[in-house]
Amino acid sequence: ANFWRHLLTAYSGRLHGYELPISHKTATSMLSTAEDKGSGNFMNARMGMGVFVAEAGPNRVAVHQAANEGFRGIYMVCFDGPDAGKGYVVVANGDNQSAICIAKIVQYLLLKSNWHGIDHALLRQRQDLDFSEVKQEEIVNFAYKTLVFDAFQAPIHSRL
C-alpha cells in the first residue's frame, strides 16, 4: 500500500514539499505505455514499465496479476482519472479456481465502488468461465480478462 501511495503521489506531481522515494519522472515512466506487443489481446492492457496499464473510460489503471503454484492474485490501482487513488489487491491460495474467485471478488468491488468506464452490465453477466480448452499457462490471464478487463470501456479519445 505504501508503494502505491508513493507512486500515485509522485505521478500526480503534488509533492507538497515532501521528498518521496519515487520521483515524478520515474512514476511517469513506469505508468507510460509502450508499443503493444500482444498484451492488448492477452489481457486488454498495454505494458508500462513493470506494470500493465489498462484504460477504463476516463480512467487509467495499473494492473498486474500473480500466478505461482498454489497462489493467485491481482492488483489494480487507478492512477489517472475520476477514480484516481482507488485500488484493490486480492490474493488467494490455490490454483485455477482461485483465479475465478479473485475475478468475482474484483467484479463485486468494481460494482460496489461504482468506477467510471466500467460496463457494469457485462460484469454482472459474466459469472461463469469454462477454461477446459485454455492452456494451463493462460488460465489466469484468461480468467481476469474475460471476467474483469473485458468490462473496461475504451476511452472516448485515445491517449498518445
Image (spheres, helix red, strand yellow):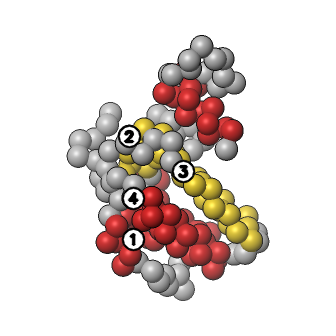
Mark pair 1, 4: CA separation: 12 Å
Task: Please determine whether, in this image, residue 92 is positioned above or below residue 153.
Answer: below
Q: Which residue is mark 2?
A: 81
State which mark lies toward you, 4 or 3. Answer: 4
Cα separation between marks 3 and 1: 17 Å
Q: Mark 1 and mark 4 in contact? Answer it, CB < 8 Å.
A: no
- The residues tagged by marks 3 and 2 sit, at their Cα atoms, a distance apart of 13 Å
As helix, strand or loop, the secondary structure at mark 4 comes to loop
Task: Give the residue type at disc 2.
Answer: Gly
Is 100 situated above or below 2? Answer: below
Mark with earlier residue (4, 3): 3
Q: Secondary structure at mark 1?
A: helix
Secondary structure state at the residue bearing disc 3: strand
Task: Tell me which numbered mark, 4 or 2, is placed earlier along the sequence.
Answer: 2
Residue 114 is marked as: 4
Residue at left offset 54%, top offset 86%:
132
Ranked by sequence position, the earlier of labels 3 and 2 is 2
Find residue 13 and report its horizontal and vertical position in percent: 50, 22
Quarter occupied by residue 92: bottom right
